[in-house]
Amino acid sequence: MGDRASSFSISRRTVFGLDIGIRDAVQYIDHGSVVYCAGKSTVAYDVAGETQKFLQISRNVREITAIATHVATCTIALATLDDDGAQSIAIYDAQSLKREKVMTRSDVKPRRVADASTAPDAIGFDGLAFSKDGASLLAYSTTEHALVVWSVRDGTSVELPRPRQFSSGADSTTSRDGDTSQFASNAHTQITHALFSPHEDDVVSAVCVGGVFRTYRVNETTIKLLSATPLNELVKDVGREVAAHAWLHNDDKHVAVGTSTGEVLILEHGAIVCVLNVARQGASSDEGCARRAVGCVRAYKNGFIVGDARGRVSIVERCARKRTKDGGVLYKCVKTLIALETKDIDAYDASNMHSASLACAEPVPNDAASYARDNADEDRDDTNASSQDTDENHHHSIVALDISPSGDNLMCTLDDKRALALSLANVDIMRADEMRFTRVLAGAHLGAISSADVCARKSIIATVSATDHTVRIWTVTADTPSLDVVVRCPDAAPLSVALHPSGWIACVGFTDKLRLMHILNNDLRVVKELPFKACRVCEFAKGGHCVAAAVGAVVYVVHAFTFETLATLRGHCGKVKSIVWRDDDSTLITSGQDGAIYAWDMRTAMHDGENARGLEHVRKGRRYDAVAALRRRGGGLVACGDDSTLTELDDEFNVVRGFSSDGVKLTHVAYAAMTHRVFAATANGGVRAYKTPLTGEFIEYAGHVGAVTMMRLSADEASLYTVGEDGCVFAYDIRDGTATVNARNSTSKCKGHHGVAFARDEVLVMRGDLDESRQRIAELQTQIKEVTLHAQYQLRLKTAEMNDRVKTVEDECERRFSMERRRVAELERERDDLTRAARQDIEDMNEAHAKALADAEEEYARKMFAEVERFASLEASSAAAADAWTALQARMTNAHEESERTLKQECAMKVQALRDTITVLERECDAQREEFATLRRVMEDTVHEEIEQLKASYEARIKREHDAGLVLRGENGVAKTKYALVKQHEDARLQEIAQLKADAESEARARAERDAEAERLRERIRTHERTLDAKNTSLADAHTELTRAEKHIAVLAQEVVALREQQTPLRARARELERDIETTHEELSRYYDANSALVRQVRDAKAQRDGLQRDIVRTRKRGADTADVVKRFQRDLHDCANCIQDAKTLKERVVTMYRTYVDDADIIADSESGVRTSEEKRQRDHLEKTVGALKRQLASDADSRRVEFHRIMRENQRLMREVEALRVKSFDGVVVTAVK
């Protein structure tokens, strides 16, 4: 068992969910894989293989705020926020999924601000972007002013300085020299989206609040502003906001900027060159800007792709160069698609797509009036187009777009957490209605998941969410996990769910009713509605024959097939939070907000619900949120509540042990019998695994961002499923031993714990659906026949038409061939003429060349003669210059020798002056040495007297303190205090002793440092003496004086050794004081043992008191039973009085009453019971008085012990302070004397 426990682990297998709050939530990491975030996990998803892999995220991560990928370098960057609120950037390898480095905000160079108090706190980055070569990483915040650029290679970084504060804005000015003093700090500096320029690696572009486009230059020390372009002023529209932008793949350095009005602005060097209205088609005139906003822009080939809030994907291409030069539009929208899955598009009208694909760009109007007229025309066009597409308002918004590295696929992320892929391989030749989206990631819950359940005999789980009003059925097989059924409930919110063990029935609790539903192939069909409102907890029995539902404080047990209410369980005073069935379905366990846990006998509950409650555990002031049954010998339960404690109960519902969860609230518990583990879900999104028997030790695994709302185990206990407030569903594999405990490897069927085998692929289908399917198949077959006949007829028509066209083309080709033959003959004649003309030109050119060559040779000979003459003249001038140089050198040599003699004489005079100065300094040194010897003798006498006086005073004080300590030890013999108080103060005193020892060690280190300083001073003195000896070797008198000085230094060293020997008795005295303190500690330990005996006595008294309380409870219960009997007797007596006229009936009634209420044995034992009752009363009174006296004595003893202990502690602290002061003074005196 120990070996298996050592290899126990939990690993994530599948995650259902997506965090769309992160910008660019789904991104490509290679040609066939994407990466996205779900909870605290980052998933690398293989689109073709439908497999998931997980990045190794640090355990202290609280939230992932941003993600970015770079395909060329296989790099993934994550911006994370840890538990302490610190922001960091983690770099991962996209192939191995291992973390390579971590960059924190502390690496950022400080901002240059005048006031340090204005420095920002920790800022969370919610946007990341790589440069084109992947060497730099950009991080920015959309809530605070933060823009940081990191170098991925060496980890260095620079930060955008905070803008200066001005009274008026200056964003309307455009600057090119990087001077930031022109721009004011206002709301327009808040960044909403930032990117690196692909044309220049050190240029960063950003769009800001208010429609401002900015560019920055990044250098080694800071980030400077290059330009700021207010787009709203350029196009005369103040209300336009900018959400995203992208640099296009062309040499013109165009930037596409998406706006909130559905327009895309094309910028070139800060000027708008084109306005493209991609939301022109299919938008109503009264539709808000939020539904027309362009939120995603991606560069594609020579154009770009945009996605808007209406679920439209528009493909824009650049027009031909000739058309652009002629004054036409630069870009046009060639295709517009609606992001729907293939099965949803089948019923969509393709004519709307054709009309939507005709949108094109238009040039920028020259003035505001023309632009207003164009906008009015666009609104009229939008009104006409809106009548053709009335269902488009129901489409989901597009929150992210990404294009694969090869450019063949487009990944589209919707606001319902779905990811769709679109093939772009044949986008040039396919029509818009022929292109189809395929689902990559299934949708997930948009809010917190209220409840979940796992089927026992099929690999499905069910989840419900009261936020998005949906019920979802998931297939959780190990090979292809998927989402099977999604049912939306707009009228009522689902609160709870339970699955039948067969997997064919689901019980869902809504705000208005409790509904039993059949799980069909792709739908849920209501079978029965029960009038139970706001059922937040429901659970099927293990056998599936009944279901328990909690409505407030009442639990209803309903038959699963006859829908009859079998039992109504009342007993809780608060809402029931958890329901658990025993394995044999004979007992139902409930826990609630009232701090009670009850076990209900179902056999009794079906006949008498009031007396069905068996075992119970009630703890006032606590709320139990979840309970799990321990399936082991002796039974027992484990429960968690709002007090952050995990509690274990035995089979009698008595608390065995409880463990604190370190202040983290536990929301749900589950028990796996095969691995002997208790799993607890936490409010911070983690799952803890405890080994049984519980010892308080656990291993925590991170998962969700918010709290875990429900946790379930599979029937084979090989998988663990958790759902949370972040809308994600996590599936974990439980490993124990050398292999994974997984019983779902069968491909055809799985077997429940009751031994019944069920086919995993079997589903329920309604008879009406089967009839509709058959009718649809027959209609499709008829359509196929008609289409085949029509195709054959059209093929014959096409064949005849093609034959005619082939004949016409042949005639045309023959005519053109004859024309081409005539044109070739004319070209040959023209070629002959040109050849003759070329030959004549070549002959003329050769004659001219020969004449020019003769002229060049004659000119060359003439120039050579002139150069020879010039060389002779230069040679003569060179000889004259050499003679002049020889004369100048002789003069310079004589002058140098004369100056050298003068410098030697001056140096001799300066050396004699220095020697005289050295003689004077030697005399002054002798005088100072004599004065030093006199002062040293005086100081030694004074210090010796002071040490003797301090020694006498300290010995007298230590004697007095020792006597006082003896008196205190005598008084401590009578001191008695409580265990908790003594231990607390004793720990404090031990800490002070440890502090004293640490101070003593620091003083010893200080003494060593001072000794080293004295040694360095002596070495310095010796160095000076050696220097003086070397300079004054020729002076015999000076040598004698230096020898005497060295002897004096040796005497000083001996005196220092003597002073250290005097210090030894003081250290011995300090050690004696420490031994006295240890003696006091041992005496206090003996007092602790005595107090422990007193605590045991108090515990025995408490046990007696508890026994008396139980007797009181039994007595009260007996009194209640007696009152009940009296009431029944009165009722029967009243019935007898009604029969007083009928003597026979009256006699029968009286006899019946006598047999019912009178027992002969009770009459005989009546006298004995009276005696026992009086004796019990006397003993109870005696015990109550004894317990009261013990309580009063305990309180008085505690008060006296507390007062005495405080007085002793104050005296001990004062004694320790005086001892420490004595040590410091003695050590300081010794060190000062040694240094002197």
Image: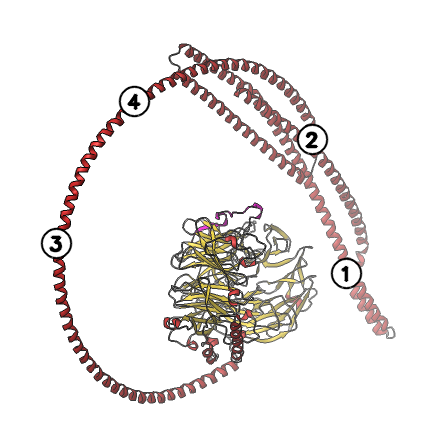
Q: Is residue 110 located in the magenta-colored stretch of the structure?
A: yes
Residue under pointer 3: 858
Q: Earlier in the sequence, mark 1 or mark 2?
A: 2
Categorize mark 3 by other alpha carbons within 10 Å: few (<14), some (14-19), many (20+): few
Q: Residue 1142 location in percent, x, y?
A: 86, 75
Mark 1 vs mark 4: give the one in front: 4
Residue at the image position 51 percent from the left and 48 percent from the top: 111
Nearer to us in this view, 489 or 1076: 489
**Outermost residue, right direction?**
1141
Q: Earlier in the sequence, mark 1 or mark 4?
A: 4
Residue under pointer 1: 1121
Mark 4 vs mark 2: give the one in front: 4
Q: Earlier in the sequence, mark 4 or mark 2?
A: 4
Q: Quadrant of residue 424?
A: bottom left
Nearer to us in this view, 950 or 738: 950
Q: Kindly report the distance in space between the C-alpha atoms of the residues bearing marks 1 and 2.
A: 56 Å
Residue under pointer 4: 898
Q: Kindly report the distance in space between the C-alpha atoms of the residues bearing marks 1 and 4.
A: 140 Å
Nearer to us in this view, 6 or 726: 726
Label 3: state its secondary structure: helix
> Is residue 675 shown to the viewer in this render?
yes
Q: Residue 397 location in percent, x, y?
A: 52, 69
Q: Is residue 584 located in the magenta-colored stretch of the structure?
A: no
> Is residue 457 shown to the viewer in this render?
no
Residue under pointer 2: 972
Name the side, left or right, on which 1128 lies relative to 426: right
Q: Kindly report the distance in space between the C-alpha atoms of the residues bearing marks 3 and 2.
A: 133 Å
The amino acid type found where label 2 is placed reads Asn
The amino acid type found where label 4 is placed reads Glu
